[in-house]
Amino acid sequence: MKLKKQVTVCGGAIFCVAVFSLYLMLDRVQHDPARRQNAGNFPRSQISVLQNRIEQLEQLLEENHQIISHIKDSVLELTDTGAVAPSGQLPFRSANGSWVLPFDGRPTFLTVQPQDCQFALGKRRQTDLQTLDVYSLLNFDNVDGGVWKQGFEISYEPGEWDSEPLQVFVVPHSHNDPGWIKTFDKYYTDQTQHIFNNMVVKLQEDPRRKFIWSEISFFSKWWESVDIHKQEAMRKLILGGQLEIVTGGWVMTDEANVHYFAMIDQLIEGHQWLEKNIGVTPRSGWAVDPFGHSATMPYLLNRANLTSMLIQRVHYSIKKHFAATRSLEFMWRQAWDPESSTDIFCHMMPFYSYDVPHTCGPDPKICCQFDFKRLPGGRVNCPWKVPPRAIVEANVAERAHLLLDQYRKKSKLFRSKVVLVPLGDDFRYDKALEWDQQYLNYQKLFDYMNSHPEMHVHAQFGTLTDYFNAVYKMNGVAQGARPPDYPVLSGDFFAYADREDHYWSGYYTSRPFYKNLDRVLESHLRGAEILYSLAVAHARHAGMEGRYPVSDYTLLTDARRNVGLFQHHDAITGTAKEAVVIDYGSRLLRSLIGLKKVIINAAHFLILKNKDVYRFYSTEPFLETDDRRATQDSLPQRTLIELDSSPRYVVLFNPVEQERLCVVTVLVNSARVRVLTEDGQTLPVQLSAQWSTPSEMSGDAYQASFMARLPALGLAVFHLYDSFDSPMTLRSDTLLRLSGRGVTARGVDPLPLRTQASDPRTFHIRSQALTLGFSGTTGLLETIRRKDDPQEVRVQMEFLVYGTRPSKDKSGAYLFLPDGKAKPYSQREPAVVRVVEGPLFSEVVAHYQHFQQTIRIHNVPGVDGLSLDVTTMVDIRDQTNKELAMRLVTDIQSRDTFFTDLNGFQIQPRRYFKKLPLQANFYPMPTMAYIQDSQYRLTLHTAQALGVSSLESGQLEVILDRRLMQDDNRGLGQGLKDNKRTANRFRILLERRSGASKVVDISPVSFPSLLSHMTSAILNHEVLALPVLPKRRGVPPLRSFAPLASTMPCDFHLLNLRSIQGQMEHSPSPYSALILHRKGLDCGLEAPNPGFNCTTTQGKLAVAGLFQGLDVHLIQPVSLSLMYSSAPLSNGSSISLDPMEISAFRLKLR
């Protein structure tokens, strides 16, 4: 009754506001002198005056209507969320059984400018090549091409080069994996250091010698170990153009499983190191070994001011098609780019591999004879049984003609008369002998060719950029510009197959434990960077620079480098030896511990009310970490907060750039927990059990969940007590659905535990926003119903198992070679199903032998309450050659189309092709995949990269873990047998298309909705709950820290606020790099209230006034890796970003 009364009062208030607004408008129309003057223009006709007034009134009515609808939405939001709940603050159950919560009563709104929706709908120039169209076109028939097995015969006319000689650039290189068969350090000690030591000596012997190097992780390690003379010699070789640094990232990154945050971060780390130590800026990208190529990479290289790039591992059928149409060199453009600002010139290597037999031309039997490391007597030979011969006067003519024939054939696949011939392989040039063998023999060949004008060739050693510059020069265009008639391509190059039906789609999931740990670490790195930059700036502002532990910068550097190292294409991919995986894991854990320390130290300084009392003692941390990991391969354990009658403080860190309304769970030792906000307001708490087994509660600890509103990128302080009087603490209601046989249920006082024999009828859990239906038999999800949606939508969860082939070629770390379609997962014993319901969250946990799945819904308004929180704990350590898959089956009419993200940066439309084997239809899913029709879109958000597909209309399927007992013959020499107990985390978001919006069929672009972007952000950046350690002298006064003075536009993502290195080793400069990404949006999906004030601004942001309590002394646009600077902006000016753009700025905060 009281609720009705309050709603009536609110309704009355709206009516009064409306009447009063109308009165004011009429008053304005009558008394506004400007309007009266206007009316005076029509003395002959009073009707015209009236008409004019009516039009003005209509316009004002429209404005009024918008104001009223905002108020109405807010009132509805308040009534929906229970802000007008009876009995003041206590949650209560509504008529349909869902809980209604007391709410902090702040109305929130979502205002997306119509112009900000246009980008997704806008026209784009058609590119000459779209990879999806190429897939549709090809037969993938794998016809034997002769000496070039996967290609075709190449012929040419002898006189083709008479008027314009062939230019040949032979580019020596050594591919050094920072960990694969050996660890990073072992490779360095055994091989890589010798490559550098020989390089310094051997390149100086002849100025015509050239070399390229890519991995800065190795280069920096060598640099730091040698004396100043060697450093100077190496710097001279680089600045003189004999040694070129290509790409210049910390590693040659994987492109399937990596997140764009880490791709950029490892590029910055490499480029910053180069800038500081060498003073050189890379011009060309070199990626010969990643297993497939993402469209994100050309964008990042372009925005880091590189002008050209090279790729190698592309499906052999696509290589053949591109070679046949002379499209192996193209301008690579982003599919979403309305113009051509993202174009970068790209060279695709045409043949099977980057080793010497597959780089001089189409015939590996001949090319192998020109790999002089394989001269008889050495440890490496030619599998084609014809060894190389040392070049002497007697054979140089014959050898030169034989090699030139290969060069000419290779050049026929390209549009210019310049040919690129890489000369190297894995860990080559580690012995001085090889430097002599390769360089001396090739120089004799070049000298012969160049001194015989009738051969019409000019051959030389070159760097990658030497080659690209020659191509631009021959075409008469500037560096990086599009040569005339060269094609423009958009799209990506997944999945990769190197031969037959051997698709490299297994590594999208291999070792998921570490794929998950990587993302946890990335979120911590970003959070630590931001808080550290803010804490140092606030310390400067307060004149306390000397007292803040800037030494934490060493921990940040260590973490940047370990995260960077793990982006290597044998690390995050899960394709290294077991001992190497342990080394990577140990580095990641060490950095995670270090980053938690950085976060704690920054939070300590920022939350103190009186900074004068700040004291830093490295042995006495002010805060505890939120969780702990016992070893590099164990799951995190939450920190237990021990309560008594004096308050324990908890600091919550929100790493997201928007205010956040969410459910936070902490672990406490008392069931009588009471939670207060900073200003003393008691919050409702849902008390739940910790479980020692699927059916037995643990008596040692309880989970306390409460709803918190947290400032953007900020820190909020909460008080916890052990209190006899805690009426706001409500207990979860737990029901165990058992099939009867041998399961003992054990509750713990005061938490009620009921048991019930399971039956096949569907059962439900509810929140204000969602109703979920579960199978009574399996305990797995069956349906989702959104609030205000009359129909239930089938979203059926299934688990399946893939085996591997009985033939000699089997699945391994790289390859997915299944033995046919997946079979349903089955076990003899029925699952134990636990149903937990309460005011803040409800969940269903289904326990199976090899996995347990928790599906939870949060009963809070906004983003956190609009999707399903899914955790699938997987343990397949007792399986043999099995892969566990999770499939969502729906009635969405998606046909053969689905969408996956590339690196969390953009969406790539996919199509299921029947003409391809099952494993070819799997793609990487770093952050999300979705299916859609004209009514609904279903998105599976993920917190770790996994392989995904849609094998039938209405389905999405993800591979959770793989256990494989054998090597798949790609050099690793091991199977995947070191599986861990792994928590795979997801969010399932069901969205409805708004009436006016129709889904566009398979356009080359698609975008997530704003809600989808936010859902991904909260999944990937969890709130950290940091308990304040009890102090003998008591805890000094604390207050929440809100760093932003104004809200960020909600289509902006603050990718990083990274303290830039100083001149001194391991110390920061006074500058920070602010990296922003403006997201592309699909506004055609219904936009529910996000739970915070969300507006867009057509890409404008006033950076000068962004940070509360800090002055911005410099805003300078810089390239993405911070190497190139533009003129500084005036302090009052706004910056402007186009949709999808990532921009970097150098800031000076104090």
Image (cartoon, rainbow, N blue to C red):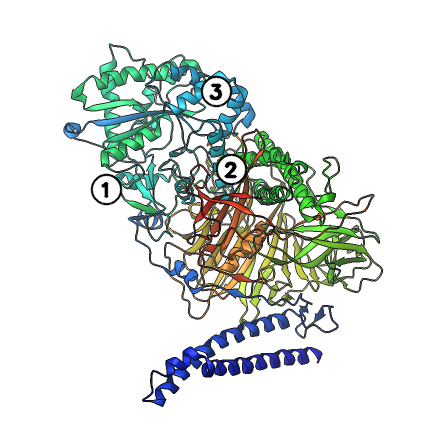
Could you tell me which secondary element the residue under label 1 belongs to?
Answer: loop
Mark-to-mark CA distance, 3 and 2: 27 Å
Name which residue type carries label 2: Gln
In the visual, does 326 lie left or right of 911?
Answer: left
Name which residue type carries label 3: Gln
| Lower sequence index among marks 2 and 1 | 1
Task: Please rate how many residues cluster around mark 2, counting C-alpha atoms within 10 Å: few if below 14, some from 14 to 19, many from 20.
Answer: many
Please name whichever residue, 317 or 333, is drawn nearer the observer in this view of the structure. Answer: 333
Tag 1 and tag 3, C-beta contact below 8 Å = no
Above or below residue 938? Residue 214 is above
| Lower sequence index among marks 3 and 2 | 3
Mark-to-mark CA distance, 1 and 3: 42 Å
Q: Residue at x 44, y 20 (%)?
A: 234
The circle drawn on residue 567 is 2
**Residue 691 can be seen, yes or no:** no
**Residue 504, quarter of the rendered image:** top left
Name which residue type carries label 1: Pro
In the visual, does 51 lie left or right of 945?
Answer: left
Residue that carries the numbered disc 3 in the rendered image: 231
Q: Residue 753: give x, y in percent of width and height.
A: 77, 60
Please name whichever residue, 324 or 997, is drawn nearer the observer in this view of the structure. Answer: 997
Residue that carries the numbered disc 1 in the rendered image: 484
Could you tell me which secondary element the residue under label 2 belongs to?
Answer: loop
